[in-house]
Image (tube, grey):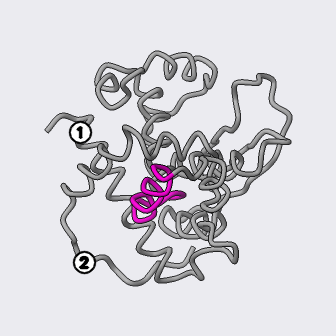
Amino acid sequence: MSNLALKIVKCFALVRQINHFYWIHTESDENNGHVSIENIETVIERIIRLPISKFTVNKETRHTLGSFHRFEDRIEIYVRKELDPLVERFVVVKELCHAIMDESEEYSTDAVQTIRELKKLKMPYINLEGAPLATRSEKLAEVMAVELIYPVEYRAADLSARTNGEPLASIAARRGVPPFIVEYALGEHMEFCEAIWKLLPDAQLPNHLEPL
């Protein structure tokens, strides 16, 4: 198995661990049925044993929706002001994924350059093999975020609903994710992620979280 393949499997294993703790130790979904971003954040804080703070800011470039900053004693996430609420939810989860998945050599201080590299990846799961580490990190954080905010268990029913004519916007509002994520998750991502989930054994996971 290649280093990239191992990294992808590791990311999905982390998603499984987060989801496990999410359902056991939190109140799970928000009242409107959306996955709770705050609960995901709480679980990740406990796993990495660092506090996480979120801030909304005016960004210098329209291409950067969010950013992630790691310090020895904390994690800080910055999200651009006035984003669509559904987009903001996804951006926050994607940045949270960096807190748990990134290795030190993957940290990037040049967000715009990383975004330029991402745009070259027309078939992300194939072309990632030769991508810069920071670019690979961004794409894998997006993949993890989809699995956390729009769990695979929901998508078969939504694919059927989509086939029967339910608009993307309606599914997006129901699930609490942006329409472009629904379209992506019900497309090429769905077959890919189902194949990865089949690779992971149903291992016993711990039922407790260590306190911060």
Name the amino acid, label 1: Ala
Residue at 44% across, 33% down: 106
Helix, strand or loop at disc 1?
helix
> Going by the image, does 136 lie left or right of 111?
left
Q: How many marks?
A: 2
> Is 70 or 5 nearer to us in this picture?
5
Q: Quadrant of residue 192?
A: top left
Q: Residue at x 57, y 22 (%)?
A: 115
Residue 108 x, y percent position in the rendering: 54, 29
Image quadrant holding the N terminus, namely top left
Q: Which mark is residue 44?
A: none
Where does the C terminus fall, quadrant-wise? bottom right
Q: Amino acid at mark 2?
A: Gln
Query: Mark 1 — residue?
Result: 5
Q: Main secondary structure of the magenta part?
A: helix
Report crowding for label 2: few under 14, some 14 to 19, many 20 or more residues within 10 A (C-alpha).
Answer: few
Q: Nearer the viewer, residue 93 or 156?
A: 156
Is 52 part of what is drawn in magenta? Answer: no
Q: Would you name the residue on which mark 2 appears?
A: 204
Q: Residues within 10 Å of mark 1 (few under 14, many from 20)?
A: some
| Residue 119 locus on image (x, y percent) | 51, 19
Q: Which residues are magenta?
A: 148-164
**Is 76 left or right of 201, judged from the image as shown?**
right
Q: Position of residue 54 (x, y in %)?
A: 74, 53
- The residues bearing labels 1 and 2 have C-alpha atoms spaced at a distance of 22 Å
Going by the picture, which residue comes out furthest to the front? 164
